[in-house]
Each structure stands twice: as C-alpha cells, then as structure tokens.
Image (cartoon, grey):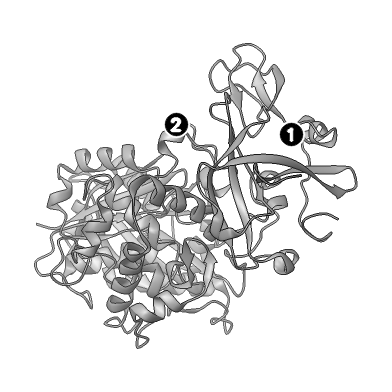
Amino acid sequence: MSRGNRSPCIVGIGQSEYTKWGGIMDRSQFQVTAEAVRAALADAGISAREVDGFTSFSGDANEANMMHVAIGGEVLRFSGMVWGGGGGGSAGGVSLACAALESGQADVVVVYRGLCQGQSRRFGKFSGTRIQGNFVAPFGLFAPSMMLAMVMQRFMHEHGIGPEAMAEVALSSRANANRNPNAIMFDKPLTREQYFASRWIAEPFRLYDCCLESDGACAVVVTTRERARDLDVKAVDILSAAMGSGPGWGQGPLASHNMPAEDYASTNSRRLAKELFAKAGVDPKDVDVAQIYDHFSGLVLMALEDYGFCAPGESGEFVASGGIRWPDGKLPLNTSGGQLSEAYVHGMNLILEGVRQLRGTSSSQVADARTCLVTGGLGVSPTSGVILGVH
Amino acid sequence: MAYFPVDMPRAEPDFNDSDYWASLGRRELCFQACAQCGLLRHPPGPMCPRCLSTEVKWIEAPASARLFTFTVVHHASHPAVSAQLPYVVALVEFDGMPGVRLVSNLTDVDPKEVRIGMPLALWWDDTGEGQVVPRFRPAATPT
C-alpha cells in the first residue's frame, strides 16, 4: 500500500458502444463489461495488474471475482456491492471505492456496471421477484415508469408544476444527445410537438419522459492523488461521494409507497444533498454543470429542488427560463443526453460525462467547468451522489 | 368476474403477510400495528420500527378513504392488463391511519375525472383460489 495523499480521484473512464436494448448480441454482457473496464484502464494509463479493487451496484451480474481473473489482476484487496436495484447506487459505487482508497484497503479501484437488456432482462417489464411485489403486482403496478408516475403526480399537485416543465427536460436532453455521436438518440431530433404527441406510458409520463432501454457498459478508474501524480491524465477530484436515505424509505415508490408523507413527493435526496455539499465545501451555486439521474424527466425537476438549485416549487420556472440548457443556462444538465437520450447504464454513463466535463472533452462542453454534481438513481434507497472537481 | 383476467400476477403470501391476505379473504381490510406501542405499519413487517417489538395486532380500516395519488396506466408491462388499458392505479389513505397507504385500483371512473383527494369506496374483487383483493371506486358511485 502506498502512503502519501490518499484523496480519491478519477483517472480513467471507459465505455462500450451504446445500443437500443437487444442491440448487443454478438458477445456476452460480461465481455462487453470487461471491455469497458479495459478501456477505462487504457484511458488512465494504468496496468490491469495494478487493479486491486472493484465495486458495483444494482446486483450487477458481472461478478468482481470473474472480472479480476478476466483482466489478469494480481492481488484483489477489496470488492463491494451497493445494496438496492436500479441506479440508486451508481455514485454509491464511487463512494465505496473512496472508502476503500481512503482507508488504505485498496490503491486502484474500478467501478463498473454492465447491462445488456437483451441478454438479461428488461427493467421496464413486470418482474416476479420484486421485493414487496405482493402489494403492487395484483393491482397492475408493475414497472418503475408507473411507480414513479404516482410520485410525480403528487409532486405536480403539491408544487403546481405542469407538463411543460417535463417537456423541457426531455427536449434539452435530446438536444444535447444530438451533439454526442455516442448517444443512441444522436441524429434523432425531437420537437415539442413530437413530445406532446407521443403516447402515454403512465400519466403524467409520456414516452419521451422515460429513459431509454439500452445495452452497454461503463467503467471508471478511481485511485489516490498520490498514484495519479505519475499518470499522464488530468485527474478529476472526488470532492465528496455519499449514499443513503431518509428514515422509513425502504423500497419506497418501487413497491408499496409507504415512505414518510412529508418525503413522499421527493427524490429521497434532501438529507444526502446537504451532506454532499458540506463535505465538498461547495454550495449549489458553485456547481457549473450537473448530471442528474433521469430515469424519468420529472424526477430531474424534483432533484433540482431537493438539491437546492432552486426553491421548492420553482423547478418549473427554473427550466422554463432556460436554466438547464447548454451552453448558457445557469446549470447545463445531462450534457451527454443523459439516460433519456444517450443510454441507460443505470447512471454510470452520467458519471463518465461528469468526468468529461471537467476534463474539457464533452461534446456539449461547458466553458471552464470546474465543479460537477452527478447523482445516482432518485426516489430509491439508498440513493447516492458525487461532487467532482478540478482546480 | 375479476377486474383483471386470470393470468394476472397474484400475491404469494409469506411469513410477514399471510395474516394480511387471510383477512382480505374474509373481506376485512386490516392493517398491522405493533401490539406493544400501537404504531401502525404497512406493508406488514417482522418488527415495529419504533419499539422493535415483534408482537402484532390487526386494525380494521375505516370505511372512509381518499385518493393520495394515482397514475393512469396506458402501457401493458404484463400481457394480463392489455384488455383493461387504460387503468388507474390508486394510492389510498384512510382517516385516522397515519403512515398507512395502500396501492390499489380505482375502477368505474373516467380517468379524466380522477382527482387527488377524492373520496373512495372499497369493493371486494374475488380473484379466485381464495384470494380477494380490495379495489376502490369513487364514493359517489351508486353500488
């Protein structure tokens, strides 16, 4: 174990191609994921033999012990999985990596997530293994789109937010995707008219309020400041990373909807956001660009409020005024196209985009971006977040 | 005839919720409470989150219920619901039962007329094989 400055930073990012679900059938999901890990290591300029830790989330099927063998790792010192499904633990995987690095349990940790929904399962379909499924399945509450639609309906009722605000999130993301050749929706512009003419999935969500169903894998290499010093890459500091939940959340809206009433119409991030900002020593106003988990457009609005980018009830005005638009908005958002228009890799693709912004290599680059918030999946427990920074 | 067809996914009662499903089978909507401190909880669980007791009692829900939130589902995520589209999934709350909210359906209603806060009336849907589930309709609808 090396001594010195053990502050965690991201030094490598890698990804596979992104396709519509079922688009990657020429090789296994595991291989696709291993290729993303390989790409991230090549990007960092770190040998696979140096990797001594792996983290993931969402019960990733691409087991760390097999990844360790696949890339020819020598000593494995740390492996960890964040509890919970979906993308709640995406930034949580980074948080776990930081815990390993800061405590000296590992020196180079790869965080990865690979999901090819054509080879595994479609997250938008009924699943017979849902926790507390007894309380939702007999009533046709099958999929996250419907489950979070109920939360959004209540949010709109309480906060006076209309459908125009959700449209703006979807349209902004698509505009960004149309500058990103790796995005699934690259070269597929979306107009306001097309948005409002699209079919309902579960009111108030229309088709374009829902994330893509896709195949792909992403990986990031996290190491210490000390190790990063010798690398030929611009290290991106992890100013803070955290996962967690308010009280009584449990499965929250992804099952029986019995989280506390005062937190019902929320992303379960109010407490987490305060901790993240305090630990990073920054305020929402210091954030130059954000990647906010967009499984559904409406949850982005909730997060803008819960993370303190605007006051409660003001997310509609915030986005209507161009607040999230690249390049001139107050907070350019989901600049790769996000999960609505780039790909749905349970939020790992948002972390990659956060790193690109701070390296200055995004296809929708925010000028002089120095601080970026990336959130994990919203409205679940644990949810997570990370604040990235460069000097 | 049941609201959804026979291939609709069914509850598979387990350690924690078999008494709940048994009460529904008797057409009684009962929620679990801690026998020691009285805290209501739903869904049923193994332990009181306030006093950590594992002793439980069952409290029958009052007749008056209201709509806390809802969604109108237009997309069939399971083939069983195809013929019933669009259908309304309702989150129901009951007077005097803080912390309890029940996922169910709101039937016999034009989806355009559904409003948060509207009063609801329970009806029992026999889904066969001894399973009965509570569903709701607008309270004003004659039964």
Residue at the spot of label 1:
B17
Q: Against A46, is A386 above or below? A: above
Q: Position of residue A313 (x, y in %)?
A: 28, 47
Extreme residue in the bottom direction: A187
Q: Nearer the viewer, residue A15 or B10?
A: B10
Residue A129 visible here: yes
- Asked whether, in this view, residue B141 is left or right of residue A210, the answer is right
User: Which type of secondary structure does the marked residue at label 1 adopt?
Assistant: loop
> What whole-number distance in Å separates the C-alpha atoms at marks 2 and 1?
22 Å
* Secondary structure type for disc 2: loop
Name the quadrant of the C terminus of chain A.
bottom left
Image-quadrant location for residue B133: top right
Horizontal side of residue A217 vs A43, given as left or right: right
Residue drawn 69% across the image and 54% down it: B108
Is A341 located above or below residue B68 in the figure? Answer: below
In front of the other: B92 or A170: B92
Q: Please tell me which residue is depicted at 76% across the width and 44% down the height of the picture.
A: B143
Quadrant of res A364: bottom left
Amino acid bearing label 2: Pro
Disc 1 is attached to a residue of which chain? B
Q: Where does the image place residue A378, in percent across and percent down from the top left? A: 41, 51
Protein chain holding label 2: A
What residue is shown at x 69% (from left), y 51% (from top)?
A: A139
- Residue A106 visible to the viewer: no
Check contact, mark 2 vs mark 1: CB within 8 A: no
Residue positioned most to the top: B36
Identify residue for label 2: A247
The answer as to whether the residues below labels 2 and 1 share one chain is no
Q: Amino acid at mark 1?
A: Asp
